[in-house]
Image (cartoon, helix red, strand yellow):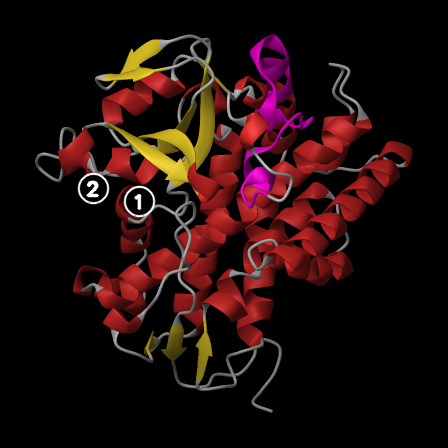
Amino acid sequence: MRREHGAVVPVLLDGGIPAWLVIGYRELHQVTGDPALFSRDSDLWNQWPNIPDDWPLRPMIGHKQPSILYTVGERHRERAAMLGNALNGVDPSELRGHAERFADELIDGISLKDGADLIAEYAMLLPVRVLARLFGFADDEGPDLVTAMNDLVDGRERAIAGQQHLFAAMTRLVAGRKAAPADDVASRMLADTSGFTEDEIVQDLMVMITAGHQPTADWIGNSLRLMLTDERFAASLFGGRNSIAEAMNEVLWEDTPTRKVAGRWVTRDTQLGGHRIRAGDMVVLGLQGANSDPQVRTDGSALTGGNAAHFSFGHGEHRCPFPAQEIAEVIARTGIEVVLDRLPDIDLAVPAESLTRRPSPWLRGLTELPVTFTPTPALGGAFA
């Protein structure tokens, strides 16, 4: 696509709906840095008259949704500050403690065996348990939230059921914390004085847990895959820790969980990457394309020294809030450390080339990561 079209590519979404995919680093920086021209207001889209009610991407793109994803201007800045303050109130030591506890519980569930699928039995279960605890849910509500979140990744019928369960759970949580505040994210959001309604807070909690769970699960899975298949990271499998951060950073550049984001909507006719873009056109953010742009990857230095100039968390006023990035990193790194500490002789159970990805252009993650290891006792007791 880059050879044929350059940094901006005309594409068709499901059902033949036209859009523009930005895969140039500088062009993506321009789009995400200019919210007045490239707005997050999906109501501007000139294709809404052509979008059927059952269009498969409708839940992703949204129309007249009262969440932070589609709020613009000063109200968005107030909303982002509210979310940032609520997340910034998370105690780092408590966060790591929750992540370690849930990770150890999950490893306890597989350690007596001689193998497991680290996607279905670990990575897809960990982030939502930690996030649910931070938001204010009781631990016994976590398993049902895990099921609902993972249903969102599956087929349409299960996705709808998962979304309904998540909405009902968040509504109960907000109502409960309204009556009895506690030291959690939901309570801190409700305590904000900017005048957000309970429904808006419910919507934003849903956005945060959805956006936080799947990409973090894929960050864990993609990083473990890299460490198990690339000899550069072999030392980490025997107690080294520095290489874990290096592997995680490389994944954000080369194998980022969130590959594309839809989107931005052009407020007036403009030029972008040599193309004429019309008012109301949708621009899809090609995060992995921009990370791989040869214009900024001429010597491979992006992968060294913890360079975080990638687009994996977005850019501009609609990027992932910094406290949310830090929470995701702690969950992912702790999850990887616990695997390597508890299963020190872990190895792939299949050839590396046989590992497959979910068939999605938006999120990049493994369908499974089968591994073998020597059975070890659970932390609380001996072998069964």
Type of amino acid under label 1: Asn
Specify whether 213 is left or right of 242: right
Q: Tell me the amino acid under the disc marked 2.
A: Leu
**Residue of label 2:** 303
Task: Tell me: 344 left or right of 76.
Answer: left
Secondary structure, mark 2, is helix
- Neighbor class of circle 2 (other Cα within 10 Å; few <14, some 14-19, many 20+) is many
Picture residue at 58% right of the left edge, 59% below the top: 155
Q: Position of residue 349 (x, y in %)?
A: 33, 80
> Looking at this view, is 237 or 13 the one in front?
13
Cβ–Cβ below 8 Å for labels 1 and 2? yes
In the image, is residue 285 above or below residue 214?
Answer: above
Q: Which residues are magenta?
A: 55-80
Identify the residue under disc 1.
249
Query: Relative to residue 293, is residue 377 depicted above or below?
Result: below
Which residue sits furthest right? Answer: 179
Real-space CA distance between mark 1 and mark 2, rounded to the nearest whole angstrom = 7 Å
Vertical placement of residue 356 versus 379, above or below: above
Q: Sequence-wise, which precedes: disc 1 or disc 2? A: 1
Spot occupied by residue 162 in the image (x, y as percentages of width and height):
69, 54
Side of 341 where 191 appears, left or right: right
Residue 307 appearing in the image: no
Q: Secondary structure at mark 1?
A: helix
Q: Could you classify mark 1 by the number of other residues whose Cα lies within 10 Å: few (under 14), some (14-19), or many (20 or more)?
A: many
